[in-house]
Image: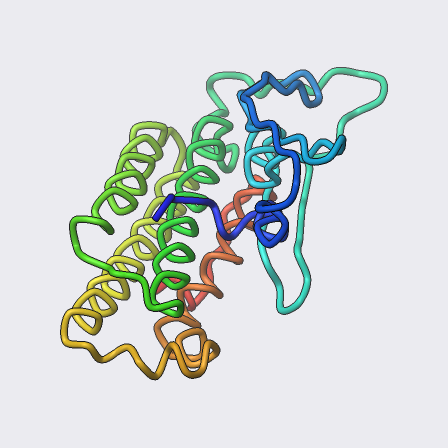
Amino acid sequence: MQSKRWGTSLVVLLCAVAVAQIKQENKTLMVNGRSGEIAVMEINGRTYLEVETLARIANGSFGFQGNQITLTLPAVAASAPAQVPAPEHAEHSGLSRDFIVSGIETVAKMREWGSTLAYAIQHGYEVTDNWVADYREQAAQSLNLATAAVSTDSDRNALQLLTNEFEAVRQWSNKLVEAKQSMDTAKYIMSPNTLRKEPLSQQIITCGHFLSAMLGSGEFRDDASCH
């Protein structure tokens, strides 16, 4: 089974893959003076970009709220350049830029881990701990980068919430792998919403949405769903 970012806007295109003319390549995207590599897919003459990567490059956030998809991009001043705080005040200036970037990437990796595993379980695919390990390690590496980027008090507080979310996803992932090994996943196949409605799933989803919004705002906030 090929790994895909089922949680991004590209998932709506999967049903047409078999009949469409597809060309995919990585390109450098420039947004508000910030640049990064992004997957670009051309299908029947139309160009599609991956929303999560777009949000990360633009220092924004991407998430789901009920039936809505939320994309938040930071405002750009039209006249004067942004004022950079003096080094002596940086320690108390909210979330640092480097932490925001690595934090958003960590949330994206955890969402990819969770959504891909949920899709596999709900569609009866074979799931083993070795298969899941790749997604888990990618999320862990992103969390390590976020840890290394901590430079303010707000960063440290936000890192604790990211770590709590990572541990919740790992606990939920281990539970599903064990259920698959014991052949106790029929209820998820018969009713796709069953998995989403479980308390731990709800907590992970709610915390993930909160983290995306909090990182996008640049200011630390707390929420009970991330504890």
Q: Quadrant of residue 156?
A: top left
Q: Quadrant of residue 116?
A: bottom left
| Residue 154 image offset from top left, x and y in percent | 43, 41
The residue sitting at 33% across, 68% down in the picture is 124
The residue sitting at 38% across, 63% down in the picture is 118
- Indicate how the structure is coloured in the image: rainbow
* Quarter of the image with the C terminus in it: bottom left
| Residue 175 image offset from top left, x and y in percent | 21, 69
Closer to the camera, 125 or 152?
125
Q: Is residue 50 left or right of residue 147?
A: right
The residue sitting at 45% across, 61% down in the picture is 207
Closer to the camera, 18 or 138?
18
Q: Is residue 32 left or right of residue 195?
A: right
| Residue 52 image offset from top left, x and y in percent | 56, 40
The residue sitting at 35% across, 73% down in the picture is 200
| Residue 97 image offset from top left, x and y in percent | 51, 28
Q: Seen from this angle, which residue lies furthest front? A: 19
Closer to the camera, 97 or 3?
3
